[in-house]
Image: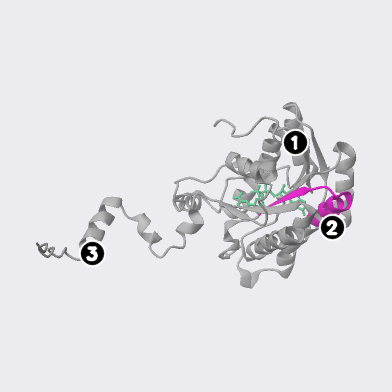
Amino acid sequence: MTTSPYRPDLLKGQHILITGGGTGLGSAIATRFASLGAAITICGRRRSPLEDTVAALRAKGSRAEGIPCDIQHREKVDEMIAEAESRQGSLTGLVNNAAGNFLSLSEQLDPRGFEAVMSINVSGTFHCTQACAQLWIQRKEPGSVLSIVTTYIETGSAFVMPSAASKAAIAAMMRSLAVEWGPYGIRLNAIAPGPIPTKGAWERLIPDKSFEEKLRDSVPIGRFATREELGNLAVYLMSDSAASMTGQVIELDGGARLAGHGAFNGLMQLPREKLAKHFDSLRPPRQPRPPKAR
Ligand code: NAP
């Protein structure tokens, strides 16, 4: 466990809603925010993960509430937010973390599967973001929104096309609103993680151990980013330390996306000694220097 880079009361006075906060990365972000004094509300469709996470947070002395909600339905989002504020006061921040994703051959993809991912990811994120912003604008209060996207928003990705399309849309939503709502003091940013082990992602997206190893081997730093690192970056973006940061998408993937792109990055697979010899052999022989004029 590394030492915390933050004051223990950094988020005191904040009340942050985290969608999909009962499991995986959402639960990790909730735990990190709560450890720095924020009151937390988490939502998701299933009651039991919400109850488990809330119980764990309360056991550590944090203020936490879980409210079941399917964010695809705007009226349910409004009800959930009203309930959250009646329990713990005005919301100051929102993390759009809830998402759907699955592997499929796009030529065989059932249109209902495509629509479900777009509905949860794009419409759900819009519903929560707009509902919070309307309250903040009406109250003349600032607010901060963080959306969890993914590194393949820049490149797309085979076999997860609805996720890639929807997360790219979320990034565009955050960037658009950062400009439009900047004058109201509402900041919107996104984190684009590479793979970070969670039960949900691994069960749906990582078919076997050898695929996991291949993925890990493609990360230049030699490992996946951790939930703690994600939590710390999320804290920074939600805190006043990032008061002028808005409309940004920050990658957290150990350099993996960049490694997949540079024309010569494939050479990373070869041993360094072999590369050094190869590069030497390609250098033109040195020309003797002409004698200095006296
Ligand atoms: P996860 O545990 O499966 O999290 C997804 C969460 O979203 C669940 O808590 C789920 O709860 C909730 N959710 C889904 N549909 C919902 C709906 N209609 N309404 C409300 N809540 C809903 O997976 P994760 O790995 O932690 O992923 C969290 C986020 O990180 C996602 O946005 C994902 O795209 C992103 N991400 C993850 C990775 C990774 O490697 N783990 C990498 C890049 C990006 P219910 O099912 O109970 O509704």
Question: What amino acid is found at the position of numbered circle 3 in the picture?
Answer: Leu
Indicate the secondary structure of the residue bearing disc 1. Answer: loop
Provide the residue designation for mark 3: 282
Question: What amino acid is found at the position of numbered circle 2 in the picture?
Answer: His
Furthest residue toward front: 294
Residue 201 percent coordinates (x, y): 62, 50
* Callout 2 crowding tier (Cα within 10 Å): few <14, some 14–19, many ≥20: some
Q: Residue 38 bears which disc, if any?
A: 1
* Magenta range: 129-148
Residue 183 percent coordinates (x, y): 77, 56
Question: What amino acid is found at the position of numbered circle 1 in the picture?
Answer: Ala
> How far apart are the two marked residues, 1 and 3, measured between alpha carbons?
58 Å
Q: Earlier in the sequence, mark 1 or mark 3?
A: 1
> How far apart are the two marked residues, 2 and 3, measured between alpha carbons?
62 Å
Query: Within 8 Å: ligand 1 and the Cβ of disc 1?
Result: no
Indicate the secondary structure of the residue bearing disc 3. Answer: helix
State which mark lies toward you, 1 or 2: 1
Contact? badges 2 and 3 (CB < 8 Å): no
> How far apart are the two marked residues, 1 and 2, measured between alpha carbons?
27 Å
Can you say whether 90 is above or below 266 in the image?
above
- Residue in the image at 72% along x and 70% along y: 111
Can you say whether 117 is above or below 25 in the image?
below
Query: Within 8 Å: ligand 1 and the Cβ of disc 3?
Result: no
Q: Is residue 134 magenta?
A: yes
Indicate the secondary structure of the residue bearing disc 2. Answer: loop
Quadrant occupied by the C terminus:
bottom left
In the shown orientation, is residue 146 left or right of residue 252? right
Quadrant occupied by the N terminus:
top right
Contact? badges 1 and 2 (CB < 8 Å): no
Which residue is nearer to you in this view: 38 or 19? 38
Which residue is nearer to you in this view: 215 or 204? 215
Provide the residue designation for mark 2: 73
